[in-house]
Image (cartoon, helix red, strand yellow):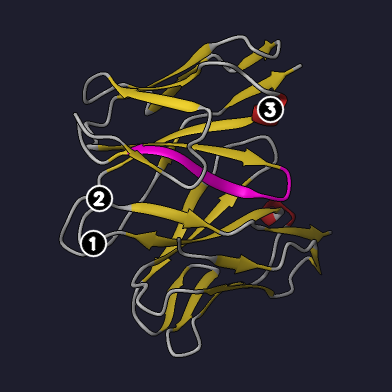
Amino acid sequence: QKEVEQNSGPLSVPEGAIASLNCTYSDRGSQSFFWYRQYSGKSPELIMFIYSNGDKEDGRFTAQLNKASQYVSLLIRDSQPSDSATYLCAVIDGVSGGSNYKLTFGKGTLLTVNP
Amino acid sequence: NAGVTQTPKFQVLKTGQSMTLQCAQDMNHNSMYWYRQDPGMGLRLIYYSASEGTTDKGEVPNGYNVSRLNKREFSLRLESAAPSQTSVYFCASSEPGDGRMELFFGEGSRLTVL
């Protein structure tokens, strides 16, 4: 069973600051990583995925992956109160080229952006 | 386009009662999943179905059974509910490809077992 570790927080940042969310994983062979956002009382939604070492940017969001350190992070620039949510890190578990995939999630980090 | 639909949204059971959570997706996805979410525990996989006709256990399958009725529908059954099964249950579907995987979640079903 793959393990995914996240700091549960809460992480509190002022509006306009950079929020940094971190995640480590146990299986060195893991290939693909995902960040989901979950607002209180709602279902999770995908915001980023990354599978190559380095950075991947999408608007105010940047995912960073370091496979040697088994570490993936999510940076949110110019944080807004609407970014306040729980952020879930997930790693894919399955055989490459097959169809038997599933996601293992971390426990999530609660982010609060203060106006 | 409804996406993933779960029913019921809320349910209260007494210990020992049985119930079935229903899930249907209209995105023609092959894979479907049932997760439970408890405070401070994140999402934990109960069962999944990679394709019609197959089901597999996830991380926390004890006390549950599933049925992949057809490509659209995947139900979760609690045969004898226990207070430890009080949780929010999420159904999800996906069409994995090349190691990429976006799960589309239903709105969740909040179950309380007294």
- The residue lying furthest to the bottom in this view is A68
Local crowd at mark 2 within 10 Å, few (<14), some, or many (≥20)?
some
Task: State the CA–CA distance, disc 3 to disc 1.
Answer: 32 Å
Task: State the CA–CA distance, disc 1 to disc 2.
Answer: 7 Å
Task: State the CA–CA distance, disc 2 to disc 3.
Answer: 28 Å
Chain at tag 3: B
Local crowd at mark 3 within 10 Å, few (<14), some, or many (≥20)?
some
Q: Is residue A49 above or below residue B110?
A: below
- Which labelled disc corresponds to residue A100? 2
Q: Is residue A89 above or below residue A18?
A: above
Local crowd at mark 1 within 10 Å, few (<14), some, or many (≥20)?
few
Let me know if marks 1 and 2 both belong to one chain.
Answer: yes
Residue type at numbered disc 2: Asn
The dominant secondary structure in magenta is strand
Dot 1 corresponds to which residue? A95
Magenta-colored stretch includes residue B44: yes
Q: Which residues are drawn in magenta?
A: B39-48
Image position, residue B1 (x, y; %): 34, 24
Mark closest to the chain's N terminus, 1 or 2: 1
- Which labelled disc corresponds to residue B86? 3
The residue at 73%/44% (across/down) is B39
